[in-house]
Amino acid sequence: MNALLIQALTQKLGLPPAVFLEETTSTNDEALRLAEAGAPDETLVVADYQTRGRGRMGRSWITRKGSALAFSLVLRPRSREEERLELFSPLGALSVASALEDLGLQPQVKWPNDVLLNRRKVCGILVEASWTGERLTALVVGIGVNVAPSAVPPDEWLIYPATSVEEITGHPVDRMAVLEAILLAFRRWRHELGSDHFMKAWQERLAFLEEEVVVQPPGQSSLRGRLLGVDGEGNLRLQLAGGEEIKLAAGDINLRPVT
Ligand code: ATP
Ligand code: BTN
Protein backbone atom coordinates (compact mmCIF):
# COMPACT_ATOMS: atom_id res chain seq x y z
CA MET A 1 0.00 0.00 0.00
CA ASN A 2 1.33 3.44 -0.93
CA ALA A 3 0.20 6.90 -2.07
CA LEU A 4 0.29 5.94 -5.77
CA LEU A 5 -1.94 2.91 -5.27
CA ILE A 6 -4.40 4.95 -3.20
CA GLN A 7 -4.51 7.71 -5.83
CA ALA A 8 -5.04 5.15 -8.58
CA LEU A 9 -7.91 3.60 -6.62
CA THR A 10 -9.64 6.90 -5.91
CA GLN A 11 -9.32 7.92 -9.57
CA LYS A 12 -10.79 4.60 -10.68
CA LEU A 13 -13.74 5.08 -8.30
CA GLY A 14 -14.18 8.74 -9.16
CA LEU A 15 -13.43 9.91 -5.60
CA PRO A 16 -11.81 13.28 -4.81
CA PRO A 17 -8.03 13.34 -4.26
CA ALA A 18 -7.16 11.14 -1.28
CA VAL A 19 -4.55 11.44 1.44
CA PHE A 20 -2.19 8.55 2.20
CA LEU A 21 -0.02 8.66 5.31
CA GLU A 22 2.62 6.13 6.28
CA GLU A 23 1.94 7.13 9.87
CA THR A 24 -0.55 9.34 11.70
CA THR A 25 -2.15 9.67 15.11
CA SER A 26 -5.59 8.72 13.83
CA THR A 27 -7.08 8.94 10.33
CA ASN A 28 -10.16 10.41 12.01
CA ASP A 29 -8.03 13.33 13.32
CA GLU A 30 -6.69 13.95 9.82
CA ALA A 31 -10.14 13.63 8.22
CA LEU A 32 -11.67 16.07 10.75
CA ARG A 33 -8.88 18.54 9.95
CA LEU A 34 -9.49 18.15 6.21
CA ALA A 35 -13.23 18.55 6.75
CA GLU A 36 -12.63 21.88 8.52
CA ALA A 37 -10.41 22.94 5.62
CA GLY A 38 -13.27 22.29 3.18
CA ALA A 39 -12.53 18.81 1.82
CA PRO A 40 -15.36 17.55 -0.38
CA ASP A 41 -17.74 14.64 0.21
CA GLU A 42 -16.05 11.20 0.01
CA THR A 43 -12.51 12.45 0.65
CA LEU A 44 -10.54 9.40 1.75
CA VAL A 45 -7.72 9.37 4.31
CA VAL A 46 -5.72 6.15 4.61
CA ALA A 47 -2.84 5.34 6.95
CA ASP A 48 -0.57 2.35 7.18
CA TYR A 49 0.07 2.91 10.89
CA GLN A 50 -1.81 4.80 13.60
CA THR A 51 -0.04 5.86 16.77
CA ARG A 52 -3.24 6.88 18.59
CA GLY A 53 -6.08 5.08 16.84
CA ARG A 54 -9.27 5.34 18.84
CA GLY A 55 -12.62 3.70 19.40
CA ARG A 56 -15.62 5.02 21.28
CA MET A 57 -15.21 6.89 24.58
CA GLY A 58 -11.50 7.40 23.97
CA ARG A 59 -10.76 3.66 24.02
CA SER A 60 -7.78 2.76 21.90
CA TRP A 61 -7.71 1.01 18.54
CA ILE A 62 -4.45 -0.69 17.62
CA THR A 63 -3.25 -0.41 13.99
CA ARG A 64 0.07 -2.08 13.25
CA LYS A 65 2.20 -1.36 10.16
CA GLY A 66 1.58 -3.36 7.01
CA SER A 67 -1.20 -5.53 8.37
CA ALA A 68 -4.46 -3.63 8.63
CA LEU A 69 -6.75 -1.18 6.95
CA ALA A 70 -7.21 2.12 8.78
CA PHE A 71 -9.08 4.78 6.89
CA SER A 72 -11.63 7.56 7.24
CA LEU A 73 -14.07 9.15 4.84
CA VAL A 74 -15.08 12.80 5.06
CA LEU A 75 -18.80 13.00 4.30
CA ARG A 76 -21.01 16.00 3.71
CA PRO A 77 -24.42 14.58 4.60
CA ARG A 78 -27.30 15.67 2.41
CA SER A 79 -30.37 16.96 4.24
CA ARG A 80 -32.30 13.69 4.15
CA GLU A 81 -29.18 11.91 5.49
CA GLU A 82 -28.98 14.39 8.37
CA GLU A 83 -32.20 12.92 9.71
CA ARG A 84 -30.56 9.47 9.93
CA LEU A 85 -27.10 10.25 11.29
CA GLU A 86 -27.28 7.31 13.70
CA LEU A 87 -27.28 4.99 10.68
CA PHE A 88 -23.81 5.96 9.43
CA SER A 89 -22.12 3.57 11.85
CA PRO A 90 -24.30 0.62 10.68
CA LEU A 91 -23.65 1.86 7.11
CA GLY A 92 -19.93 1.37 7.69
CA ALA A 93 -20.50 -2.05 9.26
CA LEU A 94 -22.80 -3.17 6.44
CA SER A 95 -20.24 -2.05 3.86
CA VAL A 96 -17.42 -3.97 5.51
CA ALA A 97 -19.71 -7.00 5.88
CA SER A 98 -20.59 -6.84 2.15
CA ALA A 99 -16.90 -6.63 1.19
CA LEU A 100 -16.05 -9.64 3.37
CA GLU A 101 -18.94 -11.56 1.82
CA ASP A 102 -17.33 -10.93 -1.59
CA LEU A 103 -14.39 -12.96 -0.22
CA GLY A 104 -16.76 -15.83 0.57
CA LEU A 105 -16.87 -15.08 4.33
CA GLN A 106 -19.88 -14.86 6.63
CA PRO A 107 -19.44 -11.71 8.69
CA GLN A 108 -21.88 -10.54 11.34
CA VAL A 109 -22.54 -7.09 12.73
CA LYS A 110 -22.24 -6.73 16.49
CA TRP A 111 -24.66 -3.95 17.23
CA PRO A 112 -24.02 -1.13 16.81
CA ASN A 113 -20.54 -0.71 15.33
CA ASP A 114 -18.38 -3.82 15.06
CA VAL A 115 -17.98 -6.51 12.41
CA LEU A 116 -17.30 -10.06 13.55
CA LEU A 117 -15.94 -13.16 11.85
CA ASN A 118 -16.47 -16.42 13.72
CA ARG A 119 -17.83 -14.31 16.62
CA ARG A 120 -14.54 -12.39 16.95
CA LYS A 121 -14.04 -8.72 16.21
CA VAL A 122 -12.35 -8.09 12.84
CA CYS A 123 -13.41 -4.47 12.34
CA GLY A 124 -14.39 -1.43 14.37
CA ILE A 125 -16.10 1.73 13.17
CA LEU A 126 -15.97 5.18 14.71
CA VAL A 127 -18.20 7.97 13.40
CA GLU A 128 -17.42 11.52 14.50
CA ALA A 129 -19.10 14.78 13.55
CA SER A 130 -17.89 18.30 12.95
CA TRP A 131 -20.31 21.10 13.93
CA THR A 132 -20.44 24.85 13.45
CA GLY A 133 -22.75 25.87 16.25
CA GLU A 134 -25.93 23.86 15.66
CA ARG A 135 -25.07 23.11 12.04
CA LEU A 136 -23.49 19.81 11.05
CA THR A 137 -20.66 20.55 8.64
CA ALA A 138 -19.20 17.07 8.12
CA LEU A 139 -19.27 13.53 9.29
CA VAL A 140 -16.17 11.37 9.48
CA VAL A 141 -16.60 7.62 9.21
CA GLY A 142 -13.47 5.82 10.42
CA ILE A 143 -13.01 2.14 9.69
CA GLY A 144 -10.35 -0.23 10.99
CA VAL A 145 -10.02 -3.80 9.69
CA ASN A 146 -7.55 -6.44 10.85
CA VAL A 147 -6.39 -8.01 7.58
CA ALA A 148 -3.27 -10.03 8.49
CA PRO A 149 -2.95 -12.02 11.73
CA SER A 150 -0.21 -9.64 12.94
CA ALA A 151 -2.85 -6.87 13.10
CA VAL A 152 -4.57 -8.58 16.02
CA PRO A 153 -3.53 -7.26 19.44
CA PRO A 154 -2.81 -9.73 22.23
CA ASP A 155 -5.91 -11.00 24.08
CA GLU A 156 -4.98 -9.27 27.33
CA TRP A 157 -5.28 -5.85 25.62
CA LEU A 158 -8.80 -6.54 24.46
CA ILE A 159 -12.24 -6.27 26.00
CA TYR A 160 -13.67 -8.47 23.27
CA PRO A 161 -11.88 -11.31 21.39
CA ALA A 162 -10.46 -10.36 17.98
CA THR A 163 -9.43 -11.97 14.72
CA SER A 164 -8.21 -11.03 11.24
CA VAL A 165 -9.51 -11.65 7.73
CA GLU A 166 -6.58 -13.91 6.83
CA GLU A 167 -7.00 -16.04 9.95
CA ILE A 168 -10.44 -16.94 8.64
CA THR A 169 -9.73 -17.23 4.89
CA GLY A 170 -6.51 -19.18 5.52
CA HIS A 171 -4.78 -17.39 2.64
CA PRO A 172 -3.24 -13.96 1.98
CA VAL A 173 -5.69 -11.17 1.23
CA ASP A 174 -4.82 -7.98 -0.63
CA ARG A 175 -5.57 -4.92 1.53
CA MET A 176 -6.15 -2.72 -1.52
CA ALA A 177 -8.76 -5.15 -2.88
CA VAL A 178 -10.60 -5.15 0.47
CA LEU A 179 -10.48 -1.35 0.59
CA GLU A 180 -11.93 -1.09 -2.91
CA ALA A 181 -14.73 -3.54 -2.09
CA ILE A 182 -15.60 -1.61 1.11
CA LEU A 183 -15.68 1.74 -0.73
CA LEU A 184 -17.92 0.35 -3.49
CA ALA A 185 -20.28 -1.23 -0.97
CA PHE A 186 -20.30 2.00 1.08
CA ARG A 187 -21.54 3.96 -1.91
CA ARG A 188 -24.22 1.40 -2.69
CA TRP A 189 -25.54 1.20 0.87
CA ARG A 190 -25.32 4.97 1.37
CA HIS A 191 -27.87 5.44 -1.43
CA GLU A 192 -30.19 3.15 0.53
CA LEU A 193 -29.54 4.61 4.00
CA GLY A 194 -32.56 3.79 6.16
CA SER A 195 -34.50 2.02 3.38
CA ASP A 196 -36.33 -1.23 4.13
CA HIS A 197 -33.63 -3.06 2.17
CA PHE A 198 -30.89 -1.41 4.26
CA MET A 199 -32.60 -2.17 7.58
CA LYS A 200 -33.31 -5.76 6.52
CA ALA A 201 -29.73 -6.31 5.36
CA TRP A 202 -28.46 -5.02 8.72
CA GLN A 203 -30.91 -7.12 10.70
CA GLU A 204 -30.04 -10.29 8.70
CA ARG A 205 -26.37 -9.89 9.58
CA LEU A 206 -26.86 -9.13 13.27
CA ALA A 207 -24.71 -11.19 15.61
CA PHE A 208 -26.37 -13.05 18.52
CA LEU A 209 -29.91 -12.89 17.07
CA GLU A 210 -32.30 -14.81 19.34
CA GLU A 211 -29.42 -15.42 21.78
CA GLU A 212 -29.13 -14.35 25.41
CA VAL A 213 -26.94 -11.26 25.66
CA VAL A 214 -25.79 -8.82 28.32
CA VAL A 215 -25.80 -5.09 27.66
CA GLN A 216 -24.08 -2.50 29.79
CA PRO A 217 -25.45 1.04 29.43
CA PRO A 218 -23.10 3.69 30.90
CA GLY A 219 -23.51 4.29 34.61
CA GLN A 220 -26.30 1.71 34.88
CA SER A 221 -26.38 -1.91 35.95
CA SER A 222 -26.18 -4.48 33.20
CA LEU A 223 -29.27 -5.94 31.57
CA ARG A 224 -29.69 -9.48 30.36
CA GLY A 225 -32.16 -10.51 27.69
CA ARG A 226 -32.81 -12.16 24.34
CA LEU A 227 -31.68 -10.17 21.31
CA LEU A 228 -34.69 -9.69 19.04
CA GLY A 229 -33.13 -7.41 16.41
CA VAL A 230 -33.15 -3.72 15.52
CA ASP A 231 -36.21 -1.49 15.09
CA GLY A 232 -36.78 1.03 12.29
CA GLU A 233 -34.71 3.64 14.15
CA GLY A 234 -31.76 1.31 14.62
CA ASN A 235 -32.43 0.75 18.32
CA LEU A 236 -31.58 -2.65 19.77
CA ARG A 237 -34.64 -4.71 20.74
CA LEU A 238 -34.17 -6.86 23.81
CA GLN A 239 -36.64 -9.17 25.55
CA LEU A 240 -36.10 -9.29 29.31
CA ALA A 241 -36.68 -12.42 31.42
CA GLY A 242 -40.23 -11.36 32.35
CA GLY A 243 -41.17 -11.12 28.65
CA GLU A 244 -41.06 -7.30 28.52
CA GLU A 245 -39.43 -5.82 25.38
CA ILE A 246 -37.09 -2.85 25.77
CA LYS A 247 -35.26 -0.74 23.22
CA LEU A 248 -31.78 0.69 23.57
CA ALA A 249 -30.29 3.54 21.55
CA ALA A 250 -26.66 3.01 20.52
CA GLY A 251 -24.83 5.54 22.74
CA ASP A 252 -22.03 3.88 24.62
CA ILE A 253 -23.52 0.48 25.21
CA ASN A 254 -21.42 -2.66 25.36
CA LEU A 255 -23.05 -5.82 24.09
CA ARG A 256 -21.83 -9.32 24.93
CA PRO A 257 -23.21 -12.81 24.38
CA VAL A 258 -23.88 -14.81 27.57
CA THR A 259 -21.22 -17.48 27.29
P1 ATP B 1 -16.07 -3.76 22.14
O1 ATP B 1 -15.33 -3.90 20.87
O2 ATP B 1 -15.20 -3.84 23.33
O3 ATP B 1 -17.27 -4.60 22.23
P2 ATP B 1 -16.83 -1.15 21.33
O4 ATP B 1 -17.48 -1.52 20.08
O5 ATP B 1 -17.45 -0.12 22.18
O6 ATP B 1 -16.65 -2.35 22.27
P3 ATP B 1 -14.61 0.55 21.18
O7 ATP B 1 -14.39 0.75 22.62
O8 ATP B 1 -15.20 1.63 20.38
O9 ATP B 1 -15.35 -0.80 20.96
O10 ATP B 1 -13.27 0.16 20.43
C1 ATP B 1 -12.10 -0.02 21.03
C2 ATP B 1 -11.94 -1.43 21.58
O11 ATP B 1 -11.56 -2.31 20.53
C3 ATP B 1 -10.82 -1.46 22.59
O12 ATP B 1 -11.34 -1.36 23.88
C4 ATP B 1 -10.13 -2.81 22.37
O13 ATP B 1 -10.63 -3.75 23.28
C5 ATP B 1 -10.57 -3.21 21.00
N1 ATP B 1 -9.46 -3.19 19.99
C6 ATP B 1 -8.45 -2.31 19.86
N2 ATP B 1 -7.71 -2.57 18.77
C7 ATP B 1 -8.28 -3.64 18.19
C8 ATP B 1 -7.98 -4.38 17.02
N3 ATP B 1 -6.98 -4.05 16.20
N4 ATP B 1 -8.78 -5.44 16.75
C9 ATP B 1 -9.81 -5.77 17.52
N5 ATP B 1 -10.15 -5.11 18.65
C10 ATP B 1 -9.39 -4.05 18.98
C1 BTN C 1 -14.53 0.41 17.55
O1 BTN C 1 -13.90 -0.61 17.68
O2 BTN C 1 -15.63 0.49 18.01
C2 BTN C 1 -14.03 1.58 16.75
C3 BTN C 1 -12.66 1.42 16.17
C4 BTN C 1 -12.46 2.37 15.01
C5 BTN C 1 -11.09 2.27 14.40
C6 BTN C 1 -10.93 3.11 13.15
S1 BTN C 1 -9.34 2.86 12.39
C7 BTN C 1 -9.59 4.26 11.35
C8 BTN C 1 -10.22 5.32 12.22
N1 BTN C 1 -9.21 6.02 12.98
C9 BTN C 1 -9.36 5.86 14.28
O3 BTN C 1 -8.63 6.39 15.14
N2 BTN C 1 -10.42 5.09 14.55
C10 BTN C 1 -11.05 4.63 13.34
Image: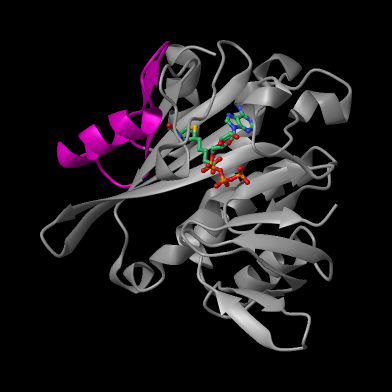
Is 223 placed left or right of 47 in the picture?
Answer: right
Name, please, the residue furthest toward the front. Answer: 221
The quarter of the picture where residue 248 lies is: bottom right
Q: Position of residue 123 (x, y in %)?
A: 63, 38
Q: Is residue 97 magenta?
A: no
In the rendered view, tell whether residue 28 sits above or below residue 22. Answer: below
Q: Position of residue 24 (x, y in %)?
A: 37, 17
Residue, x 15% and y 36% (percent of image)? 37
Residue, x 38% and y 26% (percent of image)? 26
Name, please, the residue furthest toward the right. Answer: 170
Comparing 70 with 150, the one in front is 150
Q: Which residues are magenta?
A: 16-44
- Count of marks, rendered view: 0
In the rendered view, tell whether residue 23 sits above or below residue 98. Answer: above
The quarter of the picture where residue 196 lies is: bottom right
Q: Is residue 24 magenta?
A: yes
- For the N terminus, the image quarter is top right
Is 38 placed left or right of 226 in the picture?
Answer: left
Residue, x 73% and y 80% (percent of image)? 239
The quarter of the picture where residue 86 lies is: bottom left
Comparing 92 with 213, the one in front is 213
Comparing 233 with 82, the one in front is 233
